[in-house]
Amino acid sequence: MSDQANFFDALPPAFPRPVARRTDPGTSWAAARLTEPRAGTNRARALAVLREHPDGLTDYELADLTGLQQNSVGKRRGELRDVGLVRATNLQRRAPSGAWAIVWQAVPANELVSPS
């Protein structure tokens, strides 16, 4: 194992390791580190809808509003959570199954921490 420092070890604690596969090239890792998702992606779509609903949405509500499947939008929302753009509220609402679902909200711009 190398004693060389890992570039991502220098990231502030508010920004966990980027979302990229171990086998992805460096450019993918750099892109994953960006705070805002690339326009036109499902991540950007999910974030835009959450920002339009400041009181928050469940993954099921987010799926309805984005037109994405619930399991797909849930993964995108999870990625946004991992980089600090989305957070869980202390609220829950009923899912279509009747189970309780977490309400998620976009972190307001004035609360975001810059990665640099």
Image (spheres, helix red, strand yellow):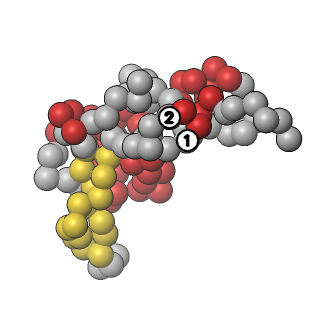
Q: Measuring 72% from the left and 39% from the top, which residue is drawn there?
A: 22
Q: Nearer the viewer, residue 25 or 63?
A: 25
Q: CA distance from mark 2 to mark 1?
A: 8 Å
* x, y percent for residue 98: 29, 79
Mark linked to residue 99? none
Q: Measuring 71% from the left and 25% from the top, which residue is drawn there?
A: 25
At label 1, counting other C-alpha atoms closer than 10 Å, the crowd grade (few under 14, some 14-19, many 20 or more) is: some
Q: Nearer the viewer, mark 2 or mark 1?
A: 2
* x, y percent for residue 16: 49, 44
At label 2, counting other C-alpha atoms closer than 10 Å, the crowd grade (few under 14, some 14-19, many 20 or more) is: some
Residue 89 seen from this side? yes
Q: Nearer the viewer, residue 106 or 70?
A: 106
Q: Measuring 86% from the left and 41% from the top, which residue is drawn there?
A: 1
Q: Nearer the viewer, residue 24 or 43?
A: 24
- Against 41, residue 83 (above or below) is below
Proximity of marks 2 and 1: CB atoms separated by less than 8 Å: yes
- Against 110, residue 40 (above or below) is above
* x, y percent for residue 82: 45, 47
Tell me the element at label 1: loop
Q: Measuring 59% from the left and 34% from the top, which residue is drawn there?
A: 8
Q: In the image, is 90 to the left or to the right of 42?
A: left
Name the residue furthest bottom: 98
Specify the quadrant of the image occupied by residue 83. Answer: top left
Mark linked to residue 17? 1
Q: Which residue is mark 2?
A: 11
